[in-house]
Amino acid sequence: MSGGRWSRARFADDAATVAERLLGARLVSVSRSGARVSGIIVETEAYVGVEDRASHAAGGRRTARNEAMYGEPGTAYVYFTYGMHHCFNVVCGAEGEPVAVLVRALRPEEGLALMRRRRGPGRSDRELCAGPGRLCQALGIDLRLNGADLALGARLFIEEGSSVKGAIRGRRIGVDYAGDWAAAELRWLVAGDPHVSRPVAGGRNLASGGARGR
DNA sequence: CGGCCGATCAGCT
DNA sequence: GCTGATCGGCCGA
């Protein structure tokens, strides 16, 4: 059912498999004072390997920034972008193979007051964790957690959730530079969940009022 | 060194 | 839908 922490083996599969498996699981961050802040994962993106032109490890690129992608499955890959946002990834696959899943949105569950304090006043529940930068801010995830071990660490981990009904796929966000890989359907979402960052383009989503033109 | 740019977000039209 | 914010990393000279 639910509750147990993800072991190393849960992370040790290809990115598409782990991206779908993460839907419905819980991402937990523990504050310095020991408070749990968590949400249920409702949106993920797979970055499948060196052949994936949208990946930071495209073509086998390996630098200080993306070194965590080459770590063992269950490693956290956190990077800083646009001069102000952090993004959190779960490293999967096999050690030495740069494969990861970006966590894009959560349905907030625990620690809502702390999330709001971190995100600023006037945030609706829906906005707290709807986007990769937003959820990092809400959970207090920054570069200090880059390379953290999600299977053993005390500060950041994944817990088993209940299985999700209505998972759907779509194109990844913000990777238009990636040629053919931009069109690959490597984003997973819980259909109709209002906490996702964006519904699938052209798709039907209960919260969006239906299909749109393109 | 210098210049470019991003796996984003918020606020405005 | 469009754009400015804001800066570390990366690459080329």
Image: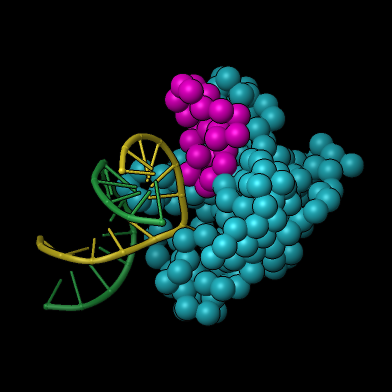
Chain colours: A cyan, B yellow, C green
Judging depth in this view, the residue of A73 and A185 nearest the camera is: A185
Does residue A196 show up?
yes
Q: Is residue A88 above or below residue A119?
A: below
Judging depth in this view, the residue of A1 and A65 nearest the camera is: A1
Q: Residue at x 52, y 79 (%)?
A: A180
Q: Residue at x 42, y 71 (%)?
A: A177
Residue A174 locus on image (x, y percent): 47, 61
- The quarter of the rendered structure image containing the C terminus of chain A is bottom right
Q: Picture quarter containing residue A13?
A: bottom right
Q: Is residue A98 above or below residue A68?
A: below
Q: Residue at x 47, y 29 (%)?
A: A119
Q: Answer left or right for B12 relative to A209.
A: left
Residue A38 locus on image (x, y percent): 65, 33
Q: Is residue B12 above or below residue A90?
A: above
Which region shows up in magenta?
A: A116-140
Residue A120 among magenta residues: yes
Residue A182 among magenta residues: no
Q: Picture quarter containing residue A45?
A: bottom right
Q: Residue at x 89, y 42 (%)?
A: A1
